[in-house]
C-alpha cells in the first residue's frame, strides 16, 4: 500500500523541480560519480532527508549505479574500496 506521503514524494521525483536539481548536481560533478570518481553519474542520492522536497544541493550527491546501489543498501559491493585498491 502506498501512503500519501510516499505518493507525494514519488510525484516530487517526477517533477520539474527535481529535474532541475538533478541537472545542477550533474553540472557540479561534470557527470562523474562524486563518491568513487570512476563512473558516470546516473543517480542523485540524498545524503539527508531533513529537507526532503526543498533540498540544498549540498544535501545531494551524484552517484554511479554501483555507488548508488551500495549507498542504498542494495549491494555489498563498494566501488570506492575497489578504486582505493587500484590506487
Image (cartoon, rainbow, N blue to C red):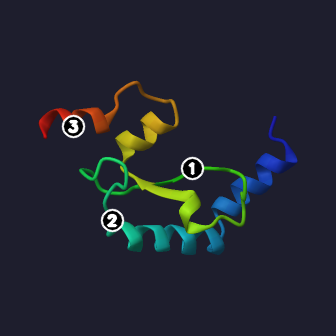
Is 51 positioned to the left or the right of 56 in the image? right
In the image, residue 79 above or below residue 47 = above
> Which residue is nearer to you in this view: 34 or 14?
34
Give whichever of discs 2 and 1 has the lower sequence position: 2
Give whichever of discs 1 and 3 has the lower sequence position: 1
Q: Residue at x 36, y 57 (%)?
A: 41
- Crowd rating for badge 1 (residues with CA inside 10 Å; few <14, some 14–19, many 20+): few
Q: Secondary structure at mark 3?
A: helix
- Crowd rating for badge 3 (residues with CA inside 10 Å; few <14, some 14–19, many 20+): few
> Which residue is nearer to you in this view: 32 or 50?
50
- Give residue 44's position: percent from left, percent from top: 50, 56
Front tag of 2 and 1: 1
Is 76 positioned to the left or the right of 57 in the image? left
Q: Residue at x 64, y 63 (%)?
A: 14
Is 17 positioned to the left or the right of 3 in the image? left
Q: Could you tell me how far apart the alpha carbons at marks 2 and 1 are, in whole angstroms?
A: 18 Å
Question: Do the CB atoms of the residues marked 1 and 3 lie less than 8 Å apart?
Answer: no
In the image, residue 10 above or below residue 14 = above
Which numbered dot is residue 31? 2
- Crowd rating for badge 2 (residues with CA inside 10 Å; few <14, some 14–19, many 20+): some
Which numbered dot is residue 84? 3
Q: Residue at x 34, y 54 (%)?
A: 33
Q: Residue at x 47, y 72 (%)?
A: 23
In the image, residue 57 above or below residue 3 = below
Give whichever of discs 2 and 3 has the lower sequence position: 2
Is 52 positioned to the left or the right of 68 in the image? right
Q: Could you tell me how far apart the alpha carbons at marks 2 and 3 are, in whole angstroms?
A: 20 Å
The residue sitting at the right extreme is: 4
Q: Quadrant of residue 58?
A: bottom right
For label 1, the residue is 47
Q: Secondary structure at mark 2?
A: loop
Amino acid at each position: 500500500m502506498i501512503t500519501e506521503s510516499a505518493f507525494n514524494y514519488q510525484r516530487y521525483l517526477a517533477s520539474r523541480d527535481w529535474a532541475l536539481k538533478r541537472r545542477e548536481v550533474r553540472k557540479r560533478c561534470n557527470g562523474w560519480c562524486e563518491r568513487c570518481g570512476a563512473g558516470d553519474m546516473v543517480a542523485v542520492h540524498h545524503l539527508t532527508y531533513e529537507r526532503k522536497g526543498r533540498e540544498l544541493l549540498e544535501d545531494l550527491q551524484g552517484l554511479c549505479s554501483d555507488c548508488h546501489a551500495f549507498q542504498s543498501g542494495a549491494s555489498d559491493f563498494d566501488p570506492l574500496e575497489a578504486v582505493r585498491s587500484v590506487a
